[in-house]
Amino acid sequence: MGAFRYFATTSKGLETVLSEEIRSLGGETVAAAPGGVSFSGDTGLGYRANLWLRTAHRVLLFLSEFPAATPEELYLGVKEVPWPEIFPVRKTIAVDATVRDSGITHSRYAAQKAKDAVADRFRGKAGARPDVDLRSPDVRIHVRIVRDVCTLSLDLSGESLNRRGYRGDPEEAPLRETLAAGMVLLTGWDGQIPLIDPMCGGGTIPIEAGLIATNTAPGLFGRSFGLPHLFGHDRKLWEALVADARGRVRRAGIPRIEGSDLSGAAVRNARRNTRRAGLSGLVSFHERDIREFAPEGPPGILLCNPPYGVRMGKGPEAETFYRAMGEAFKKRCRGWTAYVLSGNPEATRHIDLKASRRFPLMNGPIDCRLLKYELY
């Protein structure tokens, strides 16, 4: 198997974490860029990346790169790719496009032009064209035009990798699974000491910590991938890698992983999500106000995504909540290390602790900081 060029997308701020993940899988020529990481490797690496990467949203396979200063150049460059040799005409397609600093200024127009080129290439070869499905296509094509140069890629992931499959409602929480996993990895947590989220919501942070501690590949939850829809898909290799991943799951020696929340509905939801993730008995949840939060046992990591910004505003409610969190940390969490994701600096200052480190992160469109507090 020869070497291919890949690009894995991620949230801004997690590029270094993702780079380390890719290197651990055997990726070569690993290079971080804003919002993602490029790397190279064989077919097996592309498969393992989809199975194992915790902080990647999508894994893209590089197809070609060409000048595209005009719509005509874009059309010809896309049409030059032998699409009928890549996937069958009966598969549905969608084209995603981004444009920046280029003569082509509208991403929707670029996507339409690229789609026409793919359809015409099929029509000329097979006398038919693939249908378009914008919601759930079999094959997703990525067009990226920066400074009049187009990079054309094929999405191997299908559904976004952050949709693990254990959340009953994927939109139930404002925190993506990939960002939650990235936050756990940024703390340096090694699965040897306790990890607690005192404001857990649907339980995404503790569940991702549980998947890390049990060495569970996040791609094992029965989600749909783009890989099987392509010619050349090695089904035996894929099935062998899935079987190997299942055999690597461990359930012994797992530290205390907990979440708590004031909302009983949130706690019940977190428990349901934990069962779907196969972590029942390993990750626990409790209904508890932050004012009553007092972790027992040996110290470890506190990691949370408290309400901020749109979720809480900037009035007295936010001030009261963050003061209570700060009091809990200072009075009842000595010896622990706390990490707080904040998109509201004004509210965060009411914690009344000095952060020893700040990790810039994007939570969707919200510019955030993961703040580290040493609770001596």
Image (spheres, grey):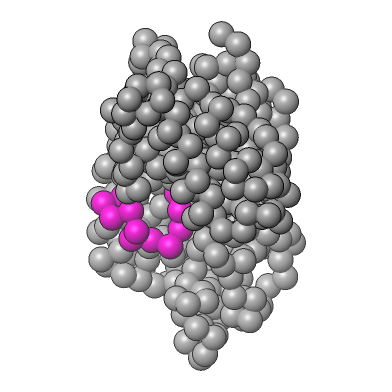
Report the magenta residues as a range: 167-177
- Residue in the foreground of this view, choosing between 242 and 158: 158
Residue 98, image x, y percentages: 57, 51
On whether residue 121 falls in the magenta region, the answer is: no
Q: Residue at x 54, y 50 (%)?
A: 110
Question: Looking at the picture, does residue 26 appear above or below residue 209?
Answer: above
* Residue 170 horizontal side relative to residue 353, left or right: left
Question: Looking at the picture, does residue 113 appear above or below residue 356?
Answer: above
Prevailing secondary structure class for the magenta stretch in the rendered image: loop
Residue 374, image x, y percentages: 68, 60
Quadrant holding the N terminus:
top right
Q: Residue at x 31, y 70 (%)?
A: 263
- Residue in the foreground of this view, choosing between 207 and 3: 3
Q: Residue at x 72, y 35 (%)?
A: 31
Quarter occupied by residue 237: top left
- Residue in the foreground of this view, choosing between 151 and 127: 127
Quadrant holding the C terminus:
bottom right
* Residue 280 horizontal side relative to residue 20, left or right: left
Residue 284, image x, y percentages: 34, 50
* Residue 282 shows in this picture: no
Q: Residue at x 64, y 63 (%)?
A: 369
